[in-house]
Amino acid sequence: MPEARRLFILLRNETHGPFAAEQLREMAEAGAITPETRAAAAGAKTWVPLGELPDSSSIFPARPNYGFKEAVFERVNVSTTPPVDHRDIIAMANRPPPVAGSVAPAAPQENELLEIVRDNQRREKAAGLYDLKPVPKKKSRRLSDYLVLMLCGNLVYLIFLIRFPLDLITLVFALSGVVLYSSSITWIMFFVMDDY
């Protein structure tokens, strides 16, 4: 686009300009205008998209296309055996099975790892790590916890009896609370829970 040519642009139905090609390029880089933005030269009657102008490449230069380079893999584990053919697999599947005892299992090959494992086992046996010892029984806390819960829970009902006037309803409520609480704690502590 010649530098002398200045264009008006139409943004949001408002005419702006005139702008030189360098100003339009800066606006395009900032994203203010696109190739679809309407433009017209001074005195022109029609608005055309900026992308359709003959020298629009100076306003919207082609951006370089960056991409990843093609991956190159090095084959390290190259097989020396020929590839397996599906016909070979079918032929092997159709052979009769070997007779039991005719083929001896292959002996494990000795290697450095087996030597390390055997050495570790010898050391563990020498240290007595394979000897089973009875686990000492810990003193149970269940009875002491049961007595604390019974004392604290039934103390609530005793305070209730002391705090409120003694009549038949209060007495029945307190006694039924003591019986229900005591039986539930006993059931939970000795029948539901394990010894701890």
Image (cartoon, rainbow, N blue to C red):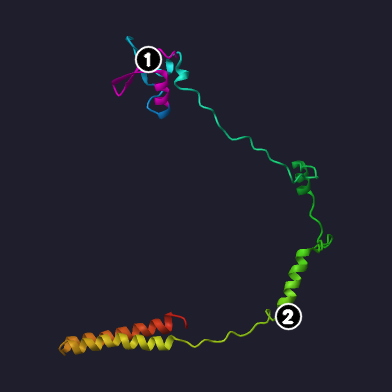
58 versus 76 height, above or below: above
Which residue is label 2 attached to?
Answer: 126
Residue 6, numbered label: 1
Between disc 1 and disc 2, the foreground one is: 1
Q: Amino acid at mark 1?
A: Arg
Q: Can residue 35 be seen?
A: no
Q: Amino acid at mark 2?
A: Ala
- Point out the image quarter for the N terminus: top left
Is 189 displayed left or right of 118 in the figure?
left
- Which residue is at a point 17% across and 89% down the rendered structure image? 168
Is 119 displayed left or right of 18 in the figure?
right
139 versus 27 height, above or below: below
As drawn, which residue projects farthest toward the right?
102
Asked which quadrant contains residue 84, the reply is top right
Read off the magenta span.
1-28
- Which residue is at a point 73% across and 74% down the rendered structure image? 121
Asked which quadrant contains residue 105, the reply is bottom right
Position of residue 56 measured from the top left corner of the image (x, y, whole percent): 45, 17
62 in magenta: no
- Which residue is at a point 79% across and 54% down the rendered structure image? 97
Q: Can residue 134 be seen?
A: yes
Position of residue 158 measured from the top left corner of the image (x, y, whole percent): 24, 89
| Mark 2: secondary structure | helix
Reading the chain from its start, which is encountered first: label 1 or label 2? 1
Position of residue 17 measured from the top left corner of the image (x, y, whole percent): 33, 19
